[in-house]
Image (cartoon, grey):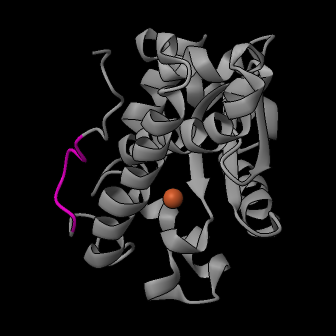
């Protein structure tokens, strides 16, 4: 039997990101929501089991190679898997307040300052209509870009490498913030794992 996709370990306790993200939200988000994407991805790929040998990033980069009958399913659930696997890693309790090194200078170069980068990405995330994500990506020419995507669409599908993302599905914040998406987005900057984002940037460059 081919290997199945699995939900990666969180790497910290469910309550580690409190008070920004409450323990119950983290538990449901990781175990039930991410768990659901992985279960549905595995189920969809039963119809094309050769993809169990692929990295999820490679599947999304080559989404048009997935059989049409399961492509939307793999796009949504495979995207959900990849996006959340990234999300757990780019959050951490008590990290640096901003990036350093090459990523810091590239952010300054691209967006003018760290503060204007935060404002631009926050606005993209807050104004995404309905469910989706706000992203910091490295594009195909190695430049930083900020934008949002709907649903679980991954920047990988357009050849971009996501290095940081804000999940703005209601499941990410509703228990604590209810309809106040902007408050959640503002608070999340307190718990960014910039060391990890810098590693993803180095991998992407
Ligand atoms: Fe989510």
Q: Going by the image, does 190 lie left or right of 11?
A: right
Q: Residue furthest left?
A: 13
> Where is 50 relative to 196, above or below?
above
Instruction: Give percent across and percent down for residue 167.
Output: 58, 58
Image-quadrant location for residue 183: bottom right
Q: Total label count?
A: 0
Please say whether residue 185 is visible from this viewpoint.
yes
In this view of the protein, which residue sits in the foreground, 188 or 74? 74
Quadrant in which the N terminus is drawn: top left
In this view of the protein, which residue sits in the foreground, 151 or 195? 151
Please say whether residue 138 is visible from this viewpoint.
no
> Where is 157 relative to 115, above or below?
above
> Where is 95 relative to 197, above or below?
below
Q: Going by the image, does 113 lie left or right of 79?
A: right
Instruction: Give percent across and percent down for residue 63.
Output: 71, 21
| Residue appearing at x 25%, y 47% in the figure | 10
Which residues make up the magenta segment?
9-14
76 part of magenta stretch: no
Q: Going by the image, does 47 lie left or right of 93?
A: right
Q: Going by the image, does 1 lie left or right of 85?
A: left
Instruction: Give percent across and percent down for residue 132.
Output: 70, 57
| Residue appearing at x 60%, y 18% in the figure | 59
Quadrant in which the C terminus is drawn: top right
| Residue appearing at x 74%, y 26% in the figure | 157
The secondary structure that dominates the magenta segment is loop
């Amino acid at each position: 039997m081919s290997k199945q996709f699995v939900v990666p370990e969180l790497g910290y306790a469910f309550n580690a990101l409190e008070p920004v993200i409450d323990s119950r939200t983290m538990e449901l988000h990781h175990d039930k929501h991410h768990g659901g994407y992985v279960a549905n991805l595995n189920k969809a790929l039963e119809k094309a089991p050769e993809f169990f040998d692929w990295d999820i990033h490679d599947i999304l980069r080559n989404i048009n190679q997935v059989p049409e009958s399961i492509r939307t399913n793999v796009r949504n659930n495979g995207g959900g898997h990849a996006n959340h696997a990234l999300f757990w890693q780019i959050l951490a309790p008590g990290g640096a307040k901003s990036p350093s090194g090459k990523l810091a200078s590239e952010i300054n170069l691209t967006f003018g300052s760290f503060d204007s980068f935060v404002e631009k990405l926050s606005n993209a995330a807050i104004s995404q209509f309905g469910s989706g994500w706000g992203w910091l990506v490295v594009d195909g020419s190695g430049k930083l870009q900020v934008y949002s995507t709907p649903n679980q669409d991954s920047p990988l599908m357009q050849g971009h490498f996501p290095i940081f993302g804000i999940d703005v599905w209601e499941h990410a914040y509703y228990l604590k913030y209810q309809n106040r998406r902007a408050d959640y987005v503002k608070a999340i900057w307190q718990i960014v794992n910039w060391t990890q984002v810098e590693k993803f940037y180095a991998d992407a460059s």
